[in-house]
Image (cartoon, rainbow, N blue to C red):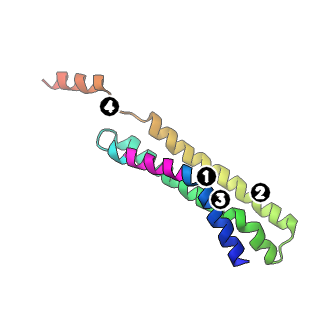
Amino acid sequence: MQNEILMITISNMATHIPVYLVWLAGIFLAIDSRKRNPRSSLFAILAIAFMFALNLIGIFMSTLPMRLNKQGYTMLNIGMILSVANIAMSILSAGGWGLLLAAIFSERHTLSSLNSHRIDSE
């Protein structure tokens, strides 16, 4: 049973490799733009880290029915547990998307605002 769960977990993680690579690129881009846009970069890094954590929890959740079934839970109980877990994951996912939206729409310094700041200070 443990080998089956491990194989399912590894195969689930392997199917997400393209997403992980995009998230990794996003983290590098956020770190690179940190000096120009510190708030946006922070929100982006938090959003990506949060979504990665949710992804790992989701992978764990995909093996949960097998583990619960082995412990003697009925299918009705497993269904109820998964329903509650899915509601919680949906709420947490909305929080991750909120962080990403904050990263996209948070205040940034534009070229015109930088130029007007220079003109005002002269």
Mark 3: few/some/many CA within 10 Å (<14, 14-19, 20+): some
Q: Give the range drawn in magenta.
A: 19-30
Question: Residue at (51%, 38%) from the top-left corner?
Answer: 101
Of marks 3 and 1, the one in the foreground? 3
| Amino acid type for the residue under numbered disc 3 | Gly
User: In the shown orientation, is residue 28 left or right of residue 99?
Assistant: left
Looking at the picture, does residue 117 appear above or below residue 87?
Answer: above
Q: From the viewer's side, name the closer residue of 88 and 100.
A: 100
* Residue that label 3 marks: 58
Where residue 40 sits: x, y (%)?
Answer: 40, 41
Disc 2 to disc 4, C-alpha distance: 44 Å
Visible in this render: residue 32?
yes
Of marks 4 and 3, the one in the foreground? 3
| Amino acid type for the residue under numbered disc 2 | Ser
* Residue that label 1 marks: 92
Mark 4: secondary structure: loop
Reading the chain from its start, which is encountered first: label 2 or label 4? 2
Mark 1: secondary structure: helix
